Image (cartoon, rainbow, N blue to C red):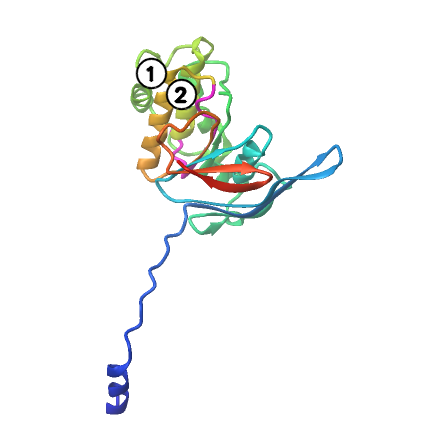
Amino acid sequence: MSDALTAVDAGAPARRRVPLRPVPLLEARDLVVVREGDSGPLPVLDGVSLSVASSEVVDVTGPSGAGKTTLLRALARMLPGATGSLLLAGRPADAFSPEAWRALVALVPQRAVLVSGTVRENLLVPWTLKVRQGRPVVGDETLRDTLDRAGLADVNLSREASRLSVGQGARVALLRVLLTAPDVLLLDEPDANLDEESAAQVAAMTVRFAEAGGGVVRVRHTRPDGVASRRLRLAGGRFEEVAS
């Protein structure tokens, strides 16, 4: 380098380094969902955008019929008519098959859906699906430990699922998804109609998932439980941030 260039560089002000923003774990941009109403097309989601970081829990609230469940279904790519962009750790949704996406961005519906059979058989349902063919099946030791940590130490793997209480069934349904190690959980009113003990256990399971690096979007109607770092209200097809 010449002396002239060296002198110029020496006298130039130092450039400010702009810190890189972390890539969200899950990102939705300009989601639009329209359904037919009595008087014509009705936008349920009207350009909604959302980002969820690793280890973050975001609660979505809003009036009945505002589109909260629709939002979760759109994030899970379960609404073919939805438009907008979805990204997982910066990768566009089109880079994944719908089945692979739903394995990583997992929706847990409000009402626990358990199949006829034992608790063990219910926990292992995901390994009967094509998306997990050829993968090692979780063993009884892991299943037992998982139940114990969810406050279900008194539930045997051989118990018929039909004999579970509502709270126990909700926890088994959530554990079934957690065992598949998704990146993001989409929880539709996970503590609705649960007793206080079961609701607390579900919240604790959610916290452990987030602490391990997962992202969570919860639809909730009940009062804040201290788990979420952000609360968003969905109304009129759009979000507004509310105090946590």
Residue situated in front as seen by the camera: 209 or 162? 209
Write down the residue under mark 1: 152
Residue situated in front as seen by the camera: 114 or 166? 166
Q: Earlier in the sequence, mark 2 or mark 1?
A: 1
User: Where in the figure is residue 145, as x and y percent of width and height?
Assistant: 29, 22
Q: Determine whether 203 is above or below 25 in the image.
A: above
> Which residue type does callout 2 highlight?
Arg
Q: Element under label 2?
A: helix
Mark identifier at residue 171: 2
Calculate the distance from the C-alpha at mark 2 to the C-alpha at mark 1.
Answer: 8 Å
Image-based side of 170 in relation to 71, left or right: left
Q: Element under label 1?
A: loop
> Which residue type does callout 1 highlight?
Leu
Residues rendered magenta in the picture? 179-192
Q: Determine whether 228 is above or below 116 in the image.
A: below
User: Where in the figure is residue 189, as x and y percent of width and height?
Assistant: 48, 26
